Amino acid sequence: TPCVVEGKVYAGSLDGFLYALDAKDGSLLWKYETEGQILGAANWMRSPEERIWILVGSYDNRLHCVDSTNGKAVWTYETGNYINGSPAVSDNMTVFGGCDAMIHVVSIIDGSKIKQIDSGSYIAASAAFVDGEVYIGNYDNVFMKADVDAGKVVWQYNQSDAPFFSSPAVGDNVVIVGGRDERVHCLNRDDGKVVWTFQTRGEVDSSPVICGDKVIVGSEDGRLYMIRLSDGSGVWSYEIGQPITSSPAVARAMVVVGCNDGYVYAFGAEK
């Protein structure tokens, strides 16, 4: 997924490069080489000097912090295995999971380790980081909340028989995540108890978006779903026909999503 900041587009590639492009004309500004493929989206933050730094994980087992102005490394942080997901940023920290089964908490100032929290199995999904709490799923069919200050897992949700590759959306009182058990799971943020589940007909690697009182998510059954946040009932769906593994974006009353058929779709109100 591209990251767009102040007129520039940052995107990783399986060739191991992070690319910086001009958003207006697509021209290449610079490219930064890692030593492994990049699957997760880049994220960004402001440095202490108010420069924009770009964060991206790689299959070289490292998280890279890159200066957006020149494409040079600011720091790198080494883990014990591949990094699939995207780093979350808050409170001068970045949080991400890895195939070493660890939830890594790293200082964004200098790339030093703050905490490592054992998730029990390798992590391919991206974390959500809100109010010092980390929400993330692993390959051992477990979704969890971890407390950064305490450095431990607070609760675990085990009512899935398949891994979590989807990244969670966090609401005021609930957290929502897709599962490879063909369901969308809505859990209470405080204790991890089930609020509702929504059944699709395919694996849900797409990451849900909470928008007002609705949830929007794609499925490998080829459908884009709109679900009611309060009770998990279906509001609307559109059958494209090919798997939707990417995550929808919502802006200006439109929903935009990519599909495995090679098209990008935009949905809006009827004209």
Image (cartoon, rainbow, N blue to C red):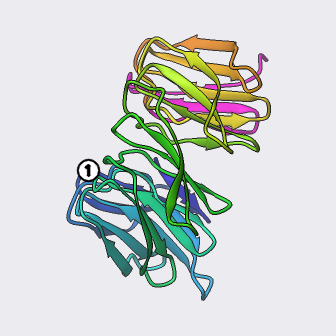
Where does the C terminus fall, quadrant-wise? top right
Q: Is 34 left or right of 136, judged from the image as shown?
A: left
Q: Is residue 99 above or below residue 49?
A: above
User: Which residue occupies 44% across, 52% down?
Assistant: 41
User: Which residue occupies 26% across, 66% down?
Assistant: 34
| Location of residue 25 in the rendering, given as x and y in whole percent from the top left corner | 50, 56
Does residue 223 appear anywhere in the picture?
A: yes
Asked if residue 258 lies in the magenta stretch, the reply is yes
| Location of residue 182 in the rendering, given as x and y in whole percent from the top left corner | 45, 19
Q: Nearer the viewer, residue 231 or 16?
A: 231
Q: Is residue 234 above or below residue 74?
A: above
* Label 1 sits on residue: 14
Q: Is residue 159 above or below residue 78?
A: above
Numbered disc 1: secondary structure: loop
Asked if residue 15 lies in the magenta stretch, the reply is no
User: Which residue occupies 48% across, 78% down?
Assistant: 69
Does residue 22 appear anywhere in the picture?
A: no
Q: Residue furthest bottom?
A: 49
User: Which residue occupies 64% across, 42% down?
Assistant: 191
Q: Is 130 left or right of 40, judged from the image as shown?
A: right
Tell me where the magenta segment starts and ends, as one range: 246-271
Around disc 1, counting alpha carbons within 10 Å, would you say few (fewer than 14), some (14 to 19), or many (20 or more)?
few
Q: Amino acid at mark 1?
A: Leu
